[in-house]
């Protein structure tokens, strides 16, 4: 269980790094921006193999 927790934390940290690199925290706060930030963080390392998640609200 401990290894799984460590992997999860590393996964989320990589997602946060990808979000910062894409400049999503500099954008105006909106539903779509918040959703994009969340899914980018959850995608983690997948961001570096071509996944570019974006959400729209509506």
Image (cartoon, rainbow, N blue to C red):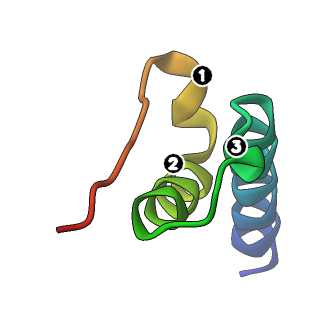
Residue occupying image coordinates x 70% and y 65%: 8
Secondary structure at numbered mark 2: helix
Check if mark 1's residue and mark 2's residue have beta carbons within 8 Å. Answer: no
Give the number of the mark in front: 2 or 3: 3
Picture disc at residue 48: 1
27 and 47: which is toward the camera: 27
* Dot 2 crowding, Cα within 10 Å, few <14, some 14–19, many 20+: many
Is 36 drawn above or below residue 1 in the view shown? above
Measured in 3D between alpha carbons, the distance from the residue under mark 2 to the one under mark 3, in whole angstroms, is: 10 Å
Give the number of the mark in front: 1 or 3: 3
Is 47 drawn above or below residue 25 in the view shown? above
Earlier-in-chain disc, 2 versus 3: 3
Q: Quadrant of residue 45?
A: top right
Locate residue 21 relative to residue 48 in the image: left or right. right
The residue indicated by pointer 2 is 43
Q: Quadrant of residue 29?
A: bottom right
Measured in 3D between alpha carbons, the distance from the residue under mark 1 to the one under mark 3, in whole angstroms, is: 11 Å
27 and 15: which is toward the camera: 27
Locate residue 54 relative to residue 36 in the image: left or right. left
Check if mark 1's residue and mark 3's residue have beta carbons within 8 Å. Answer: no
**Residue 35 picture location, percent across and down:** 45, 64
Picture disc at residue 56: none
Secondary structure at numbered mark 3: helix
Residue occupying image coordinates x 51% and y 57%: 33
Measured in 3D between alpha carbons, the distance from the residue under mark 1 to the one under mark 2, in whole angstroms, is: 10 Å
Locate residue 44 relative to residue 58 in the image: left or right. right
The residue indicated by pointer 3 is 19
45 and 35: which is toward the camera: 35
């Amino acid at each position: 269980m401990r290894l799984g927790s460590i992997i999860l934390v590393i996964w989320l940290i990589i997602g946060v790094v990808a979000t910062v690199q894409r400049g999503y925290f500099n954008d105006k706060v909106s539903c779509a921006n918040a959703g994009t930030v969340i899914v980018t963080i959850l995608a983690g390392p997948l961001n570096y193999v071509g996944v570019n998640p974006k959400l729209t609200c509506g």
